[in-house]
Image: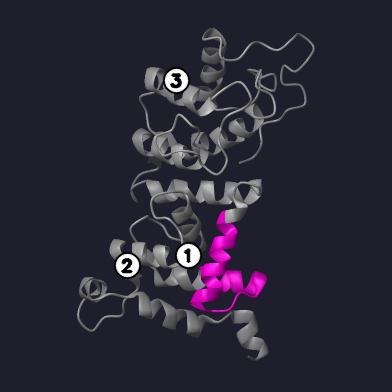
Amino acid sequence: MNDRERKRGPDDALNQMFDRLVSDEDRQAAGAGKAVDAIGAESAQNYISSMGANIENVEAFVVLEIVRADSIGQITRQGFVEGWSAVYLEQRIPADPTAHRNYVQAAIKSLPQNPSYFKKVYQHAFGLGKEPAQKALEKDVALVFWDLFLGTESSDTGLGPRPWKSQNVDWLGAWKRFLAEKWTRSVNKDMWNQTLAFAEKTLVDETLGFWNEDQAWPGVIDDFVLWCREEGIAKAPVPGLGGGEGMDVEDY
């Protein structure tokens, strides 16, 4: 491999790998004589499974983030090639199905221990769940996704890779109950991202002492804090201990 190819990545080999994922149905969808630039839902699911990822839980989102998918039911040639080429350039993972599968498995295993990577996959999931013309997730979709990523024992999907539960509080259960009672709107990107930022802080301080009304949390999170205190889920912090001093809202 020459210097130009090293900088560009193994694009030719990746294009050949993508070609092997294409089904007759994908060719038919592309049209006779036209290049296949995307594979559909069935081929995408087969590919995710071939990487050893469970298509019914958050493992699928790991694969879809790597290949830069814009929706759950489609993987584009461009996203596949650019995504795996970036992995090659960063970590020298060759264009080989076995090497890719091993990389995916390592990435999945890292989710519980690697907050920054978990955040990356979580944030990418927002785009996967919404319709192309929409700017927000439907509430029901967001609830399913939160179960997959942050699930606790009370979740229908079981434990997620980073359960939103502290020693004394099932925060995800409380969040879902609050939304069922108080929230009828969709979930925009800021709410999606800041929910994770808030969740991480609750695992450190379950009194919610990090929060105050002058911070830049979305209004729904402010309302959730007040609701938790009204419901006795989180006790107000002791005066002088907490109250949000020095705890800025992260730029998610």
83 relative to 119, above or below: below
Looking at the image, the residue that sits furthest to the bottom is 2
Per the rendering, the mark at residue 91 is none
Pick the front one: 154 or 226: 154
Secondary structure of the residue carrying tag 1 is loop
Q: Which residue is mark 2?
A: 43
140 relative to 95, above or below: above
10 Å neighbourhood of mark 3: few (<14), some, or many (≥20)? some
> The disc labelled 1 sits on which kind of residue?
Val
Disc 1 or disc 2, which is closer to the eye? 2
Q: Residue at x 55, y 36 (%)?
A: 163
Q: Which residue is mark 1?
A: 67
Q: How many marks?
A: 3
Pick the front one: 36 or 102: 102
* Main secondary structure type of the part rendered in magenta: helix
Q: Residue at x 66, y 70 (%)?
A: 91
Q: Position of residue 244 (x, y in %)?
A: 72, 21
Q: Position of residue 131 (x, y in %)?
A: 33, 48
Instruction: Compare marks 3 and 2 and give the one earlier in the sequence.
Output: 2
Distance of label 3 from label 2 (alpha carbons): 38 Å
Q: Which residue is mark 3?
A: 178
Q: Is residue 103 magenta?
A: yes
Quadrant of res 92: bottom right
Quadrant of res 198: top right
The magenta segment? 83-108
Q: Residue at x 57, y 51 (%)?
A: 120
Distance of label 1 from label 2 (alpha carbons): 14 Å
Q: Along the horizontal axis of the image, is 141 left or right of 99? A: left
> The disc labelled 2 sits on which kind of residue?
Ser
17 relative to 234, above or below: below
